[in-house]
Image: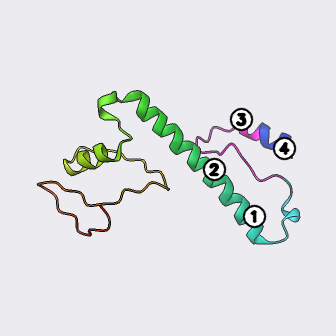
Amino acid sequence: MEEDTATYQSISTYKHLLKNSIPGSMADLREPLQLLQKAYSILETDSIEQHAAALRTARDKTSASRFSTDPDVILQAAVEGRVEQIYLDEGAAKLGVLECATYESWDKRIF
């Protein structure tokens, strides 16, 4: 089965083909939920890898003055309308009030 998958992947011209697959036979999966969980895991892993690659590409193609990981610099640039793309760490948090002459926080708990 793995050999068939590898062969298919090597000859396929479909550009969105994922590199991982669900091994085994459908008979091995007694519950449809198992198949869904395995498929979701593959999709999630692929999505994370794609986003990480896009971030690396953006960092490599962008001058240092236009790429930042500093939340204060990013917030100021966003207020000024200078943010084209933003990648957020799921665990990131910035608490406090953003004070800027041209911006007023709509909810004091957010900024």
Q: CA distance from mark 2 to mark 4?
A: 19 Å
Which residue lies under the disc numbered 3?
A: 11
In the image, what residue type sits under mark 1? Leu
In the image, what residue type sits under mark 4? Glu
In the image, what residue type sits under mark 3? Ile
Write the residue at 51% across / 44% down.
51
Q: CA distance from mark 3 to mark 2?
A: 23 Å
Q: Nearer the viewer, residue 58 or 90?
A: 90
**Marking on residue 2:** 4
Q: CA distance from mark 1 to mark 3?
A: 25 Å
Which stretch did the figure color magenta? 8-23
Which residue lies under the disc numbered 2?
A: 45
- Residue 76 in the image, given as x and y percentages of width and height: 23, 47
Question: Which is more N-terminal, label 3 or label 1?
Answer: 3
- For label 3, the SS is helix
The local crowd at label 2, few if under 14, some if 14 to 19, many if 20 or more residues have their Cα within 10 Å, is few
Magenta region, main secondary structure: loop
- Residue 64 in the image, given as x and y percentages of width and height: 34, 28
**Marking on residue 35:** 1
Q: Nearer the viewer, residue 1 or 106?
A: 106
Question: Is 17 inside the magenta-drawn segment?
Answer: yes
Residue 95 located left or right of residue 91:
left
Write the residue at 19% across / 56% down.
99
Callouts 2 and 4 close, C-beta under 8 Å: no
Dividing the picture into quadrants, the one containing residue 110 is bottom left
Q: CA distance from mark 1 to mark 4?
A: 17 Å
- Discs 1/3, front: 1
- Discs 3/2, front: 2
- Residue 47 in the image, given as x and y percentages of width and height: 57, 49
- Residue 27 in the image, given as x and y percentages of width and height: 88, 64
Residue 42 located left or right of residue 32:
left
Question: Which is more N-terminal, label 4 or label 1?
Answer: 4
